[in-house]
Image: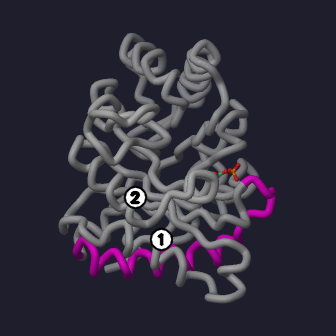
Amino acid sequence: MAGMSTTRVPLIAGNWKMNLDHLQSIAFVQKLAWSLKDAKHGFASVEVAVFPPFTDLRSVQTLISADKLELKFGGQDLSAYDSGAYTGEISGAFLKALDCDYVIIGHSERRTLHHETDEEIGAKVTAAIKHGLVPVLCVGETADDLETHGPSAVPVAQLKAALATAAKGVDIVVAYEPVWAIGSGKAATPAQAEQVAAALRVALVDLIGQEAADATRILYGGSVKASNIAGFMREPNVDGALVGGASLDLSEFSSIAQFQKHVGT
Ligand code: PGA
């Protein structure tokens, strides 16, 4: 049954975009780990992941493994191909070799600025799964889409296109990110996020089966901050957040990860 949020471990994910070089990434991850440790963060009850630029991943991996940190990490994109003459591309095999758990796929900035199509995004999802990475598949409507098609039509269509060939039972994360809310300071309301997340979960049942649909974390993304995370997390179909700008602010991100402390407020 949809909405069984108790069975899903929330995921707070920081999408750094093109920010922080490898030295800055080490300092940031170290401080984040200290901050969460000070707060006695329970990683088993709220997973925390960072998505640094590719050039940072080796440094982040080394720090996390040396200090046995419970933080997870992943890439911001991957190639649909395994290897070969694809200058500038990064294989899922390389990400897996660096211990990445996750990879963001189909972020709106890649759909818009790099003209990624639903077909390419679907091929990337297939490649991620093939290499043992959990795709964090981003879907979301523009302000125009919202006016023309209503709230969930475009995100649901993007989900169906990306998972058209996905096997039943696959392990994925879906991030609902309304394009109009990304970096705008104008987050969706919790009710808006819940409406689309619920529609996405219904679509997931057909695509990957009931059990996997119930287990899939659906994140909300778009201007998430420490001051608004609690409202989203109270919604039954919202299982975490994909955080951009606020993920680069240590105290904000740490506080978002500890939403359980302010979810009742
Ligand atoms: P934002 O970005 O939190 O800065 O709005 C979210 C995202 O693009 O993933």
Looking at the rendered image, the quarter that the C terminus falls into is: bottom right
**Which quarter of the image is occupied by the N terminus?**
bottom left
Left/right of residue 72 with respect to residue 55 in the rendered view: left
- Which percent across, then down, holds residue 215? 31, 63
Residue span colored magenta:
183-209
Identify the residue under disc 1: 237
Question: Is residue 79 something that shows in the picture?
Answer: yes
- Farthest front residue in view: 85
Locate residue 191 relative to residue 240 in the image: left or right: right
Of labels 2 and 1, earlier in sequence is 2
- Three-letter amino acid code of the residue under disc 2: Glu
* Residue picked out by circle 2: 120
Instruction: Name the magenta segment's main secondary structure.
Output: helix
Tell me residue 207's x, y (percent): 28, 75
The residue located at (32%, 57%) in the rendering is 123
Look at 53% across and 84% down and name the residue there: 153
Amino acid type, mark 1? Asn
Question: Marks 2 and 1, how far apart in space?
Answer: 27 Å
SS for dot 2: helix
Query: Which of 188 and 106 lies nearest the eye of the viewer?
Result: 106
From the viewer's perspective, is residue 155 above or below residue 217?
below
- 204 above or below 251? below
Residue 52 on the magenta span? no
Q: Quadrant of residue 145?
A: bottom right
Q: Are marks 2 and 1 in contact (CB under 8 Å)?
A: no
Secondary structure under the numbered disc 1 in the rendered image: loop
Of tags 2 and 1, the one toward the viewer is 2
Quadrant in the picture for residue 148: bottom right
Dot 1: few (<14), some (14–19), or many (≥20) neighbours within 10 Å? many
Q: Nearer the viewer, residue 203 or 68?
A: 203
User: Is the residue marked 2 within 8 Å of ligand 1, measured from its CB?
Assistant: no
